[in-house]
C-alpha cells in the first residue's frame, strides 16, 4: 500500500526558508495519514455503501434484490471510500476540515459514479425492466438514468466518508488516529 501511495501521491520537498534556500522533507507522517485515511474511508464506505445498496435493492421488492444491492454496495462503497479518503487527505492535508472533505467526496463520488454507471451492461438493465416495477422502470429506462443513479448514490457515500475523514485529520493529532 505504501508503494502505491508513493506513486500516486509523491512526497516532495519544500523550501521552509526560501530566503536561505534550505530544503526539508515534507512530513514523513503523511504516509501514515494517507494509509489510515484510506483504510478508514474503505471501512466507512463499505458501511454506508451497504446501507444504500440494500435500500436501493429493496426497490425490487425481492429479497435477492436486497442481497445483491448489499453486496454491490459494500464493494463499491469500499472502493469509493478508500479513494475518497486518499483524495481528502490530498486536498485537505492535516488542516482541512469537514467541509473540504465533504465537497471533495461529493465531487469525486459523483464523477466516479457516472463513469461506473456508463458501464452497466444492457443485460442487467433488461433484467431489471422485466420486474415491471414502476420506479425501477423509470430509473433503468436508459443508460443515462442508470448512470445518474449510480453517480448520486456514490456521491452520497463519498460525501459522508470525505466529511468524516476530513474532520478526523483536522481535529485530532495523527497519534490518535
Image: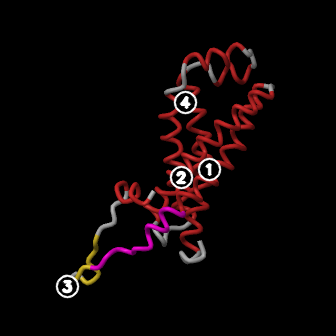
The residue sitting at 53% across, 57% down in the picture is: 38
Quadrant containing the C terminus in the rendered view: bottom right
Say which label, 2 or 3, has the lower sequence index.
3
Query: Could you tell which of marks 1 and 3 lies nearer the N-terminus?
Result: 3
The dot on residue 82 is 2
Gap between marks 1 and 3 measured at Cα: 44 Å
Could you give the CA–CA distance between mark 4 and mark 3, rounded to whole angstroms?
52 Å
Residue that label 4 marks: 147
Q: Secondary structure at mark 2?
A: helix
Q: Is residue 176 above or below residue 54?
A: below
Looking at the image, is 110 positioned above or below residue 93? above
Write down the residue under mark 1: 45
Q: Which residues are magenta?
A: 24-36
Q: SS class of the residue under badge 3?
A: loop
Q: Secondary structure at mark 4?
A: helix
Tell me the crowding category of disc 4: few under 14, some 14 to 19, or many 20 or more residues within 10 angstroms, Cα based. many
Q: Nearer the viewer, mark 4 or mark 2?
A: 2
Is 130 positioned to the left or the right of 1 in the image?
A: right
Amino acid at each position: 500500500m505504501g508503494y502505491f501511495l508513493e506513486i500516486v501521491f509523491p512526497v516532495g520537498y519544500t523550501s521552509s526558508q526560501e530566503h536561505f534556500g534550505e530544503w526539508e522533507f515534507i512530513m514523513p507522517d503523511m504516509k501514515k495519514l494517507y494509509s489510515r485515511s484510506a483504510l478508514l474511508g474503505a471501512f466507512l464506505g463499505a458501511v454506508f455503501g451497504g446501507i444504500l445498496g440494500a435500500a436501493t435493492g429493496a426497490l425490487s421488492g425481492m429479497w435477492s434484490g436486497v442481497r445483491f444491492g448489499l453486496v454491490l454496495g459494500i464493494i463499491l462503497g469500499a472502493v469509493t471510500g478508500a479513494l475518497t479518503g486518499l483524495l481528502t487527505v490530498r486536498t485537505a492535508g492535516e488542516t482541512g476540515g469537514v467541509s473540504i472533505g465533504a465537497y471533495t467526496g461529493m465531487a469525486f463520488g459523483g464523477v466516479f459514479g457516472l463513469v461506473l454507471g456508463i458501464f452497466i451492461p444492457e443485460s442487467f438493465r433488461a433484467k431489471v425492466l422485466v420486474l415491471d416495477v414502476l420506479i425501477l422502470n423509470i430509473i433503468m429506462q436508459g443508460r443515462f438514468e442508470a448512470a445518474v443513479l449510480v453517480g448520486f448514490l456514490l456521491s452520497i457515500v463519498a460525501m459522508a466518508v470525505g466529511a468524516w475523514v476530513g474532520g478526523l485529520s483536522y481535529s485530532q493529532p495523527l497519534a490518535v488516529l
